[in-house]
Image (cartoon, rainbow, N blue to C red):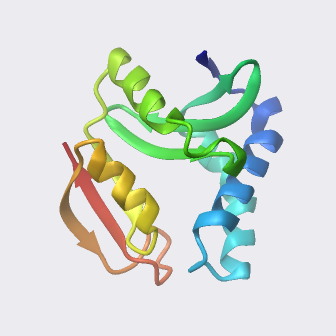
Amino acid sequence: MLRAQAATPTDYPALTQIWWDAVTATHDFLTPTDQRTIATALPTYFAQVDLLAWYADEQLIGFSGRQGAELVMLFIAPSATRHGYGRQIIAQLDQQSPVRTVDVNEQNHGARKFYAQCGFQLVSRDAVDGDGRPYPILHLRR
């Protein structure tokens, strides 16, 4: 059974570890310096979104963050990927209020495929990420 719980600052270290592990497994395009910089900034990002910690059988397996209808972060521990949790998370978020938009790194082919399977389509592209780093961002909508 998958369940969500509102995340608090005491959860941030565990969520940051999930982020780190997931990014290490999927974001081979990030430089080590950028990965460390982003990891350091995560608590600031966490505090700005509706942040949920996701549990399967009482084990923390990932987290999501949204701002209104935009999904701004969804990370699942590598040990929990390919179990359908991502789709279940999107479905549960949709029950609260439909997720309409999401941004994804152009180089993250797995995430692009996942979001396409969830019905998201490309709307636009930025050549750099929100902090000006050379990681193109795709803006998706459904």
Q: Is residue 104 left or right of residue 31?
A: left
Taking 47 as reference, is 122 above or below it? below
Which of 125 and 88 lies nearest the eye of the viewer? 88
Residue at the front extreme, as displayed: 83
Q: Residue at x 69, y 71 (%)?
A: 35
Q: Is residue 21 left or right of residue 63?
A: right
Which of 109 and 15 lies nearest the eye of the viewer? 109
Q: Residue at x 80, y 40 (%)?
A: 14
Q: Is residue 126 left or right of residue 50?
A: left
Taking 8 as reference, is 44 above or below it? below
Q: Residue at x 21, y 48 (%)?
A: 141
Q: Quadrant of the C terminus?
A: top left
Figure label count: 0
Residue 136 location, quadrant: bottom left
Q: Position of residue 85 (x, y in %)?
A: 53, 33
Which of 62 and 78 lies nearest the eye of the viewer? 78
Q: Residue at x 78, y 32 (%)?
A: 11
Which of 52 and 58 lies nearest the eye of the viewer? 58
